[in-house]
Image (cartoon, rainbow, N blue to C red):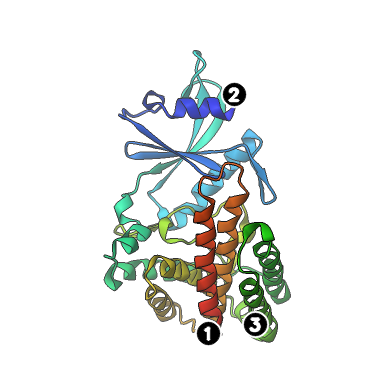
Amino acid sequence: MDLAHKVAFLRQPETYPATVERVEAIETHMSWVFIAGGDVYKLKKPVRYSYLDFRTLDARHQDCLEEVRLNRRLADGVYLGTLPVTARSDGGVSIDGGGRIVDWVVHMRRLPRERMLDRRIQSGELDADELRPVAERLADFYRQLSPVEINPEEYRHRFADDIDENRRELMDPEFGLPAMQVKVLCDAHDQFRQQNASELDRRVADERIIEGHGDLRPQHVCLTEPPVVIDCLEFNRGFRILDAVDELAYLAVECERLGADWAGTQLLTTYSGITGDQPEPALVDFYASFRATLRAKIAIWHNRDDDVNNPDKWVQRARQYLALAEHHAKRF
């Protein structure tokens, strides 16, 4: 049974165990998400990229299990489990039926969209009191994680590889981005990496490298009580191995892009108060600049999709990230 057939039936309200009036279907690069009443179901696409391979049923099932396991760390009560997609005798599919298993979905509780951090920032209503519980939750999360064993040289080399790829991709003439700006940024990142090798090594020695969330963006943070963080990057552990401060700088720069340039200070101050970790300001700015450059690359990659709808949107988004990267690079 192919993906289109499954999606067609998963769009229909009668497919689901609970009674729902309508189903909202959202397509991403790697999955289909179906919002049915108070429940959300995520179906993995049978795709293959350099960093994942979901072409087999077993691979998709294992990734569903891993997604639930990892996300329960910061969103317990939201990730309810995995459910089979089963074939029906009439050729359709059901969720958790009695027929042959043709796929798997991650089952989640629906969160209020108006309480997502990106929405709160864009509305202009977010304040420090509202963000504080998120900062505390994340700081407690990092404090309780066991450090990851990694060689200091390997940690530094990871940046070198990413900097080289950022330079190569963002300077590709097909994207039309300012080549000199990209060159100056990547040169600055490479120079910091080399001149501050001892500082990066110290982060490893101080056991600050952890297995974090991996994709800590405002649209993945919900300001409920307590706050929850969803959509952990589950498919590649290497992407989750990073400095806790690096991950917070990533969230901070995303908040900054949306208009909350004050959020980073609160996130880092709260983190330092709870963990006792006092990172050098230059290191925080390096991480923020590096992450913004990575986000510029990911944004512009959308324009390689055959069915991209609005290429100008992604050019402007990449330019926004490059401007943020430049702002932070001037501070280290």
Q: Amino acid at mark 1?
A: Arg
Q: Secondary structure at mark 3?
A: helix
Tell which of 161 and 71 is nearer to you. Answer: 161
Q: Which residue is mark 3?
A: 192
Quadrant showing the C terminus: bottom right
- Compare marks 3 and 1 and give the one earlier in the sequence: 3
Q: Position of residue 46 (x, y in %)?
A: 62, 37
Q: Residues within 10 Å of mark 1 (few under 14, many from 20)?
A: few
Q: Position of residue 236 (x, y in %)?
A: 62, 54
Q: Residues within 10 Å of mark 2 (few under 14, many from 20)?
A: few
Position of 5 relative to 129 (above/below):
above
- Compare marks 2 and 1 and give the one earlier in the sequence: 2
- The total number of labels drawn is 3
Q: Which residue is mark 1?
A: 331
Q: From the image, state whether disc 2 or disc 1 is nearer to you.
A: 1
The Cα atoms of the two marked residues, 3 and 1, are separated by 12 Å
Q: Which residue is mark 2?
A: 1
Quadrant showing the N terminus: top right
Q: Are marks 3 and 2 in contact (CB under 8 Å)?
A: no
Left or right of 19 on screen, residue 30 = right
Left or right of 157 on screen, residue 274 = left
Residue drawn at the location 67% of the way across and 70% of the way down: 163
Tell which of 223 and 32 is nearer to you. Answer: 32
Q: Secondary structure at mark 1?
A: loop
Q: Which mark is residue 310?
A: none
Position of 286 relative to 309 (above/below):
below
Q: Amino acid at mark 2?
A: Met
Tell which of 118 and 10 is nearer to you. Answer: 118
